[in-house]
Image (tube, rainbow, N blue to C red):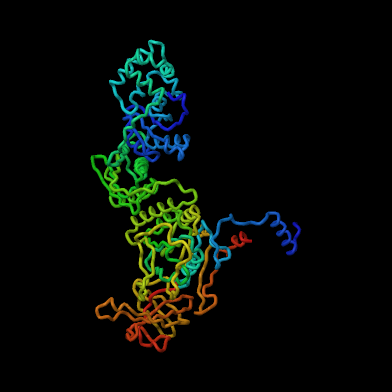
Amino acid sequence: METSREYVEQVACLFFKAGTPLDPLAEACFRFSSKIALRRDEAVFVETGRSRWLYTQPSLDAKLRALSRRFGLAARLSFAGNAATALAIARFNESRPACLPLEALVDYASPFERNPELSKSVMAMVAKLRSLGLASLGDFTGLPALQVGSRFPPEAAGLWQSLRQGAPELWPPFKPAELIEERSSLLGPEQGQGCVNLEGLLFGLKPALERLMARLRGRDLRLSTFELGLDLDRKIQRVLRFKLPLPQSGPLELLRLVHERLGAEFQRRSLPAPVIAVHIKVIETAPGAARQVDLFSKQEEESEAFHSLLGRLSQRLGPGKVYQAGLSQRYRPERAWAKRTDGLAWPLGQKGPAPLPLFQPRRPLRLLLRPQPLLVARGSDLRGPQGQRWKLLEAEGPERLCGDWEQDEACRGFVRDYFRLVCGGGENLWVFCVPGKELEALAEPGPWAERQGEAFYLHGFFD
Amino acid sequence: MPPTLSPAAKRQAVEALRARLGPVRPPSRDVLSFSELPSGVSKGGLTEVFGAPGGGKAEFVARLLAEHPAEPAAWIEAGATFSPAGLPCHGVRLDRLLLIEAGAELEWTALQVLRSGLFKIVVLNPQAPCLPLRRLQAGAEAAKAALLLLGDGPLAEDRWALSASIQVQRSLRLHSPDPIRWTDTRKQLPWKQAVNM
């Protein structure tokens, strides 16, 4: 027994009612320690000696209880110097090891697995000890060594020695299942006979997602692809595959993505029957970036929120609708910039001074999708393609833009002379004419005497 | 018969009452400083910027973006006529700007962007002026973001949700020293004048 030694608590034991499946919880506990052991369907052991500088006992206590609640389990939690003592303390709800009843010897004999034969022989020994008037482990460890060796079976001597001297324990390694899957039933007193709307479904889905993400965090992984299966009444199943734009590690952002996708899905195809269960299967993961929360920067959380936002927007608006713009080395105004949809990262842009180009010609902020013919009427009146009327006051130009010879087979490229026009209402238009191209029947001679007879096109607005 | 007061005495009485009430000011909100607007642009509020097509409203907003290069901004458009190639000449860094073509999902997109809490300047260009301003205002307030609504004309409904309404008009001369003029139309309302006293 360790009462005589300096007591260093280094094992946490989560004890549950027998028959509770504990593999998912044990998997999630890997976030606290790499040394986890499982007593099948009864207890999870977490070796905390190596992480004692990361977690104080009260904080670890609170975290483990919260994690247990996330898996819908109510744990009895204990801390001790070894797994057997921690298990016995939790089982008998007695914090002083010396006061534990003699029946705790069964846990000392086999802390990591149930061994019915060993338990039987230990209980027979306990009966003998009780007949001699012993009641607690303190009484047992107080026996002289010679008496234990000569009067009791060999197991008693071994137990006495491990209790007195703290024999090292061999922890059986816990290996989580290869496939990560979570399931949640939507039948019950709260949900009734399944879910018929999106809100109810998300309510039932949230705990399953939280458990799934806790398990992935235990493995230091992030979720990148998963399948969501909806079990409908009448034995119908619908499976949706989610490929995330950026691997996620938080359940809330993931839930938002699922919300959007399911909303769109149900608008397209309504549910033919109530959903009675949901199950999530992890298809693909990415390495996690487990580290302590940075108190001085929110960059990691913001990055996840950003990619979740991108995912939701792209899912709803379609590809190519969310982007950053980059200037391209083209003179044709329609091609002067390009969309950048891949590799968007948070924070946007680079730190430091603005990397603006040295010279940027003045360009309009609105470009028509196709240049529209502009009617230049008598008396400096302009008429737009949709019947707009402008009174021309001033014109600036021309600015000749040409290029793209390599873009067509005849190597003609494009040549345009652009003008900026100031109109009576303060509007600034961007129009061009193609040198040498004759005025079409629509137009009449305009205010630019030297340009008479050429066709003008409205291309944009300096909005 | 009540005693009649001379206009000077009335003014004096009113001034005395005002002094007792203290300065009446709107609830303090953070503002983004803006050289074009002495009162700045309200963070957590809606600012309407309207003017004729080609009247300079987008350039007005571009100047705000240029003055806050460190603030991440989102520019949401209903259509696809926006040309970001016109921004760098106003000093706007394209790499700090997220552009979204929302089409018919403009309101949903704006709310998603605001709720993410990542963007401190959100520019919204609805082609039809029928947006639920109250929801957008609540979203902007929660995100503490400056939400700027572009339009060809002033919004007809729910104007009470606006923090400011700016009418933008260009100078009629090409090389005017003051190329874009603006008017804060909300300040012309009588109650607004009283609040800003």
Image spot of residue B149 (x, y percent): 47, 63
Tell me which corner region of the image, top left, top right, bottom left or bottom right, holds residue A456: bottom left
Please say if A41 is above or below B181. Answer: above
Residue A239 position within the rendered picture, expressed as x and y whole percent measured from the top left:
26, 46
Q: Residue furthest front?
A: A146
* A140 lies left or right of B37: left
> Between A203 and A414, which is closer to the camera in this rendering?
A414
Can you give x and y, in whole percent of width and height, for residue A252 in the image?
Answer: 40, 46
Count of numbered badges drawn on the protein: 0
Q: Looking at the picture, how far across and down is residue A307, in whole percent?
A: 38, 54
Q: Nearer the viewer, residue A357 or A453?
A: A357
**Extreme residue in the bottom direction:** A450
Between B79 and B192, which is closer to the camera in this rendering?
Answer: B79
Q: Residue at x 36, y 64 (%)?
A: A340
Q: Quadrant of the N terminus of chain B?
A: bottom right
* Left or right of B100 on screen, residue B143: right
Q: Is residue A204 visible?
A: no
* Image height of A153 relative to A317, above or below: above
